[in-house]
């Protein structure tokens, strides 16, 4: 158990809908990362937050957004969902978001868009 | 572009034997960090081992060790005394100084035969 929690574990929804994925980092970690794992794209970095502020952005679609709250949990919002958004979404955390720190991953949320 | 290549989509090993998974990376950076993550059927991403590029000594964690060849940009993972529980997808990942995102290879599926 990495100490990173994600809810829900599974999510099934329809095209055009909006969903919210939730992540709680390890105790003491200030930085949260979101990754998407799909069959065709592999594991890709989406976005990083540090202590409530966005720090880095990767291949995140405009239909997707995220935020980190004062209690340090983070939410990833996916809207106008398409079939291709079906994937495993991981959250990871590290103490201060610096490159030399190991990122510890949560169990993931499996999203299926029908 | 920063890329990570795992040339072996699948590997198999007999229980108690040794197996080596290959990883190469492309970088012009001098400051970076390398990781191996394991993803068992549960889909959890579990850190196996990490290596700092500035360290000449190869990292070791129990039955897991790496062969880090900086000049060749190679970072292979050796699993000794393979166990059934080692069966998983193994991902090589890289992060460079000043970056916030891990870049992953496509993964190697390891099967352990009893």
Image (spheres, coloured by chain):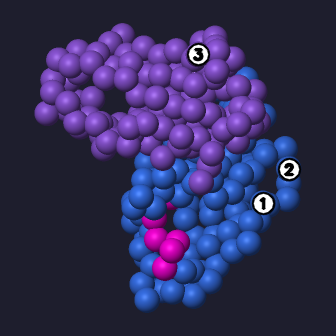
Chain colours: A purple, B blue
Q: Which of marks 3 and 2 is in front?
A: 3
| Residue count near mark 1 (Cα–Cα under 10 Å), binned few <14, some 14–19, many ≥20 | some
Magenta residues, start to end: B84-90
Numbered disc 2: what chain? B
- In the rendered view, does B89 fall on the left or right side of A110? right
Element at badge 1?
loop
- In the rendered view, does B13 fall on the left or right side of B29? left
Q: Where is residue A105 in the image (x, y as percent from the top left)?
A: 56, 43
Mark seen at residue B97: none
| Residue count near mark 2 (Cα–Cα under 10 Å), binned few <14, some 14–19, many ≥20 | few
What residue is pinned by disc 2? Answer: B55
Camera-side residue of B61 and B59:
B61
Numbered disc 1: what chain? B
Q: Where is residue B5 in the image (x, y as percent from the top left)?
A: 50, 48
Q: Are marks 2 and 1 in contact (CB under 8 Å)?
A: yes
Q: How far apart are marks 3 and 2 (CA)?
A: 37 Å
Numbered disc 3: what chain? A
- Residue A45 can be seen, yes or no: no
Q: Considering only vertical position in the picture, is A54 above or below A111?
A: above
Q: Is residue A52 magenta?
A: no
Q: Which of marks 1 and 3 is in front?
A: 3
Query: Which of the image's four quarters has the C terminus of chain B?
Result: bottom left
Q: Do labels 3 and 2 share a chain?
A: no
Q: Distance between the residues labelled 1 and 3?
A: 36 Å
What residue is pinned by disc 1? Answer: B59
Residue B81 falls in image quadrant: bottom right
Element at badge 2?
loop
């Amino acid at each position: 158990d990495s100490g990173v929690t994600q809810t829900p574990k599974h999510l099934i929804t329809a095209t055009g809908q909006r969903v919210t994925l939730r992540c709680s980092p390890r105790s003491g970690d200030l930085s949260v990362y979101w990754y998407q794992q799909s069959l065709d794209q592999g594991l890709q970095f989406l976005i990083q937050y540090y202590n409530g502020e966005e720090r880095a952005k990767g291949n995140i679609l405009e239909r997707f957004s995220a935020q980190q709250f004062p209690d340090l949990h983070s939410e990833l919002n996916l809207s106008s969902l398409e079939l291709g958004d079906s994937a495993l979404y991981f959250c990871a955390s590290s103490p201060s978001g610096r490159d030399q720190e190991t990122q510890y991953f949560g169990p993931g949320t499996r999203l299926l868009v029908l | 572009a920063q890329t990570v290549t795992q040339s072996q989509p699948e590997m198999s090993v007999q229980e108690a034997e040794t197996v080596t998974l290959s990883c190469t990376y492309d970088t012009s950076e001098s400051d970076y960090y390398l990781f191996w993550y394991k993803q068992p059927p549960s889909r959890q991403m579990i850190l196996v081992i990490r290596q700092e590029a500035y360290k000449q000594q190869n990292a070791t964690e129990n039955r897991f060790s790496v062969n880090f060849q900086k000049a060749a940009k190679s970072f292979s993972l050796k699993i000794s005394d393979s166990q059934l529980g080692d069966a998983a997808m193994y991902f090589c990942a890289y992060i460079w100084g000043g970056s916030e995102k891990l870049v992953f290879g496509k993964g190697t599926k390891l099967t352990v035969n009893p």
